[in-house]
Amino acid sequence: MKSGYKQTEAGVIPNEWEVVPIGSLIFDYRGGASLKPSDFTSMGVKVLPKGGVGRTGWLNVAEDEQKYCSPEYAAANYRNQVDETYTIVVLRDLVPSGPSIGLIVQIRDKETYVLAQGVYGFKVNEKAVPGYLVHLSNTNWYRKMANSIMVGSTQVHITNTAYKKVLIPLPPLAEQEAIAEALSDADALIKALEQLLAKKRQVKQGAMQELLTGKKRLAGTKKTEIVQTELGRFPADWILTPLGTLVDPNRSIRYGIVQPGDYDRQGRFMIRGQDYSKGWVASSEVFRVSDAVEAKYKNARVKTGDLIMTIVGTCGLVETIPDWLDGANLTQTTARVAILPSKANSAFCKYMLQTEAGSLQVNNFMKGAVQPGLNCADVEKFLIPLPADRTEQTAIAEILSDMDAEVTALEAKLSKAREVKAGMMQELLTGRIRLV
């Protein structure tokens, strides 16, 4: 064991840290009220539900999910009320695996809440920092401990007695404060990135709505009247063009490998729908298939810029092939649409198929209830509202591609921030790294 550390019931911790029952750190312990459906009102005093307690560290109840009780009910149940001076913990979960059981959060606003059943509030004494307990409740060690002491089957719970006996590692007060502050700063960065990412996605969605319906025409583009078509309203100079007429005649629309067999780390990439359903995954997550199997389906290989579409299960997901997947193959759940650059811009077609016009056609052509699907002949019939001017197609595709690149960069930054925070938790909440 590393010098300066000791083995305890809560794991290996610094010698200066204690192991104490959580009950020794809390007082004014309050449980939830026995609210019946008839006790809820449209306005009044807010009710604090289990659903508002998650891993964010702060109480978070969506506006459309917020419930209320009358002031009279709240007054009659004053021992079930809490405010921002209380720390909140969930000790009951409707899910048997107990994903939220034991989680701790703080209240950010100045509201008074009536606790729902299964949610408890407490104040901490001078030995503890609420923020430290909040972050501790998100560690793997704590989650395993909470699950080990919960009882029940359908509705699991932790008894008050069992919870108060839980032994936790407790650094000196100054170190608790430093740990809580460092992890809260990491949370603030993550939240800021999440908000920026959401905003960027909204901006892109708005741009698609404007550019891919012709409501906004780019500079230098001849403006024409907007007319009604079977797919919606588009400029009169945009032509509804069957996808099949845009395809390279030497590379027809086709799906890929039916029976992959054994996967091969050195083989050719084999693209599945989940590899691009939310933007491209990392190359390490894409399966590879043996050359012997892949060679039987070599006519389904893709090239950079090709359009691909899911045709089994969640149909109609579309993407274009990036450089690093040039020469890859497909599974039978995905079809290749090799658009000739001289006929249309492949990225423009991708974005158009991601709009309502694309969804409408997926729903019209899709067959089957248990396992919905499209066939390649169906995909050929998909119509693309295509600007007659190729430069307009390219310009729109470039604008949206640039927006996608910004979103992808932010997603990577957010993922990295979450990884860093997870590493910080592992180091700080075990005392491997000391801040004081």
Image (cartoon, grey):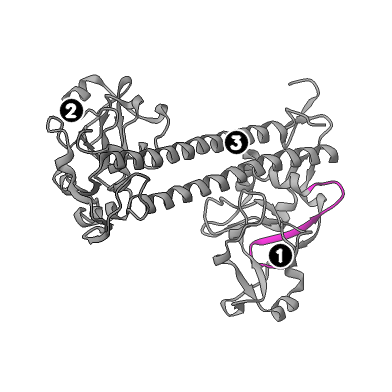
Q: Is residue 286 above or below residue 309?
A: above
Nearer-the-camera pick, 341 or 94: 341
Q: Is residue 258 above or below residue 392?
A: above
Residue at mark 3: 417
**Tags 1 and 2 in contact by the CB under 8 Å rule?**
no
Residue 309 pos. (x, y %): 27, 41
Q: CA distance from mark 3 to mark 1?
A: 35 Å
Point out the image quarter for the C terminus.
Answer: top right
Specify the segment rendered in magenta. 113-129
- The residue under label 1 is which amino acid type? Gly
Q: Which mark is residue 297?
A: 2
Quick check: can you spot residue 180? yes
Point out the image quarter for the N terminus.
Answer: top right
Quarter assignment of residue 276 = top left
Q: Which mark is residue 31?
A: 1
- The residue under label 3 is which amino acid type? Ala
Left or right of 69, for residue 13: right
For marks 1 and 2, give the one nearer the viewer. 2
Residue 250 pos. (x, y %): 12, 29
Residue 229 pos. (x, y %): 22, 60
